[in-house]
Image: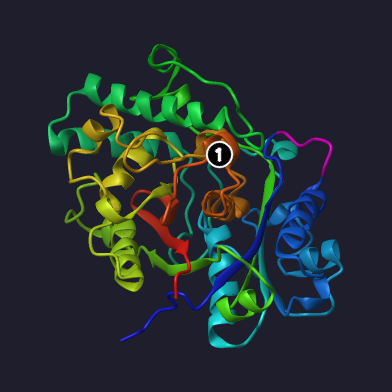
Amino acid sequence: MPRGIKDEVAILGMGCSKFGERWDMNAEDLIVEAVEECLNDAGIERSQIDAAWFSTAIEEQHVGKSGVPLAVSLRLPYIPVTRVENYCASGTEAFRGACYAVASGAADIAIAVGVEKLKDTGYGGLPQRMRGAVADMYWPNASAPGSFAQLATAYSAKHGVKADDLKLAMAQVSVKSHENGAKNPKAHLQKEITVETVLNAPMVAEPLGLFDCCGVSDGSAAAIVTTPRIAKSMGKQDIVSVKALQLAVSNGQEASHNSWDGSYFMTTRRAAERAYKEAEIKKPRDEVSMFEVHDCFSVTELVTMEDLYLSEEGTAWRDILDGFYNSDGQIPCQIDGGLKCFGHPIGASGLRMLYEMYLQFQGRAGARQLADPRIGMTHNLGGFPHQNVSSVSIVGRYDA
């Protein structure tokens, strides 16, 4: 049985660009902005990096499909650079590759960088031709809002949640995230909103309104990882270590027959179960201090709270209304503002989530700072409800 990599990898430094409509910068500029902060935070030179992983999901935005754009942008010293893409989990996939390289001994120091430059192209997640053995099709009538609206109605029907109650809970999800994002100078959107604003906004796909949907933005984030031993030898204090990294990918079962009712994500549950086992977490609702989930839509965040076993099935909407996941609640969620306030430059989002966990553990989150967090978790979900990938990362204070 795999033993996992708990406490075998430490985060040496992290960096994150300002997210938003970065008309003044191209993707390479955003990479440099994030990596310069990352290198300064880690206290190392580029020449000390042994290998790199580069995530970007929209291949048309960069030169070719390789790691060359990252190597050229940073003038890396002819080291291995691997370009990865795994739907919306791409940033976490880059982090996973760098961590596994360090844990295996293949690299002493590795870097993971994610970037996406979408605003200049007007990209908004519109249907596109899909290629490959399992996706050689075109869905002209499919959209992300439409698919996730079906998730909301399936959840409501299964658990007997009234439509108005579900809309109110989803509104609170967005209000909570905007309240947190207003305290984050790197967020795209930094303005608080009210429940009334959410409920009275234009409808996108019933029951999802305008404020139930995350936007599109430009951004980049980076992480440098090494072993705890090396981090200590460099004089690092308050070391943040990786407790678990797990990825689950749909095998087609959800779309093949009716054993899946459309109200939850099978991949998230599988990834979470394995992540908790790897991190030796027995009671996540009691042990997790904070977390970031893939809130592409407010209902996605709500459902994911149950898929991560933090709320009992059918009860997340009540926990949300009770303030359980607010910044002053028992387990703060989206303490940096989430996708809702950062937007979703696909290749960068997973690393951006980890950046917030890292800042919190370092006591450097400013107005968002939580009191003594011990365990942080991030979650990414890519694809459609019936065919997707989910990643779960758990990080925390290194106490060994």
Q: Quadrant of the N terminus?
A: bottom left
Bounds of the magenta span? 21-25
Q: Quadrant of residue 48?
A: bottom right
Is 137 rendered above or below residue 229?
Answer: above
At label 1, which amino acid type do we have? Leu
Query: Which residue is more in the foreground, 131 or 124?
Result: 124
Query: Which residue is more in the foreground, 180 or 30?
Result: 180
Q: Quadrant of residue 101?
A: bottom right
Q: Left of 311 or right of it: where is 297?
A: right
Question: Where is residue 396 drawn, in percent x and y?
Answer: 45, 62
Is 204 rendered above or below residue 115?
Answer: above
Question: Where is residue 198 drawn, in percent x and y?
Answer: 42, 18
Colour scheme: rainbow
Q: Quadrant of residue 197?
A: top left
Which residue is pictured at 23% across the width and 22% down the height? 165
Question: Where is residue 136 drawn, in percent x and y?
Answer: 48, 59
Q: Secondary structure at mark 1?
A: loop
Residue bearing mark 1: 126
Q: Quadrant of the C terminus?
A: bottom left
Please tell me how crowded label 1 is: few (under 14), some (14-19), or many (20+) other residues with Cα within 10 Å: few
